[in-house]
Amino acid sequence: MDLGFTAEEETFRHEVRSWLEANLPSEWRQGGKGGYRDEEDADLQRQWQRRLYEGGWLKLGWPREAGGGGATPVMQAIYQEELAQAGAPGILGRLGVTLLAPTLVAHGTPWQKETYVEKILSGELIFCQGFSEPDAGSDLAGLRTRAERRDGQWVQPGVEVRRITQMTGGGEFGEIFLSGAQVEDRDLVGEPGDGWKIAMTVFGFERGGLAQAARFERAVAELASLARDRGAGADATTRQKVAQAQIEAHVFRLIGMRNLTQAQHGHAPGPEASVVKLYWSEMDKRLQETAIGIEGMYGALAPESALAIEGGRWQYAWMWAQAETIYAGSSEIQRNIIAERVLGLPRGR
């Protein structure tokens, strides 16, 4: 595992940091929270995405022949880490930018690339991800949705979308009812029967690593500040929990560095990725529980309450953290993967 950076990489870090100082307004910088609460947050994310697009950052890791920056995995990680440390907001079209656009670059037709890619990056088009079904949520291999060829088009069993309001008040999730949606031939990605291969390509573009580590380190620093402000620093149990959060965040950074070293040497992510998902989701739940405990009775207030501490950001983050051990593969599923594919334990009946 390589824990250092080359002179070229440090120069690149300075370039990213300087650009952020010049282009990220202080009022846009924010503490860690998932998703967005309202249209104002969504509009901010759209503006920030456009600014990153115009700065040429959203193609950073793409091959140069595809119009990208050709950045190494380490440089991509440095870029994401600097965004997290600066408290930059997310982008509205995250799924399209990070998953769909590079998948189209890899598997799309020239028409698809010309029609969709730049509009996805700029935020003109927003794409969503629809992998889960009622009987196949975390079990992606159990998906049954398919399309049939009819009259020169692909017909899916179409599209009615019902918003799902989460307990955070946000609405990033929705129910999608497929009841006869028609897709033209030119919008089919890959060849018929390639759905699973394309899906695996999509998941291959999911990343964590140093950016997540930087966000957690920032959250731990804010947790310590909250403890001091609330006069909880004198409590031995609170000090122990904050120290434990600091230790866990540091260990997570080391995990990220190990994975980054493997990526730099051309090793594709394997089942060890389940360790990352399990670790950070459980870690964040503990961190948010500690924050709510420090707030005491104020921790029971709704995020929008006028009396909520720091604008209710800790309550919001706590609610979001409850979903983290469920989405993208529940903790139970991750433990099974680790047991069977990493440790080689026998599969339970």
Image (tube, rainbow, N blue to C red):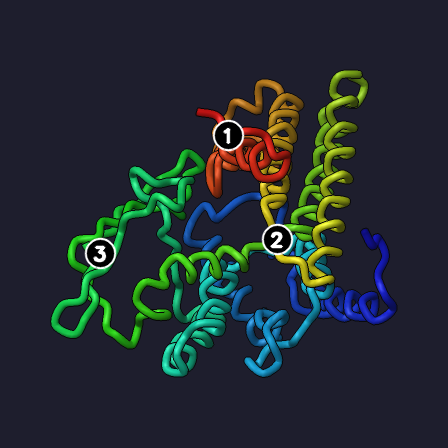
Q: Position of residue 182 (x, y in %)?
A: 19, 65
Taking depth in this image into account, of 111 and 194 the one nearest to the observer is: 194
Taking depth in this image into account, of 305 and 17 the one nearest to the observer is: 17
| Quarter-of-image position of residue 59 | bottom right
Question: Does residue 119 lie above or below 155 as drawn?
Answer: below
Of pointers 3 and 1, the one earlier in the residue sequence: 3
For residue 143, the mark is none
Of pointers 2 and 3, the one earlier in the residue sequence: 3
Q: Position of residue 104 (x, y in %)?
A: 44, 71
Q: Position of residue 97 (x, y in %)?
A: 50, 65
Residue occupied by mark 3: 159
The residue shown at (18%, 66%) is: 149
Question: Does residue 65 lie above or below 97 as drawn?
Answer: below
Amino acid found under the numbered disc labelled 1: Arg
Residue placed furthest toward the top: 236
For residue 347, the mark is 1
| Quarter-of-image position of residue 235 | top right
**How many marks on residues?**
3
* SS for dot 2: loop
Q: Where is residue 315 in the image (x, y as percent from the top left)?
A: 54, 32
Amino acid found under the numbered disc labelled 3: Val
Left or right of 272? Residue 108 is left
As measured in the structure, the alpha-carbon distance from the residue carrying label 2 to the one carrying label 3 is: 34 Å
Residue occupied by mark 2: 269
Left or right of 215? Residue 315 is left
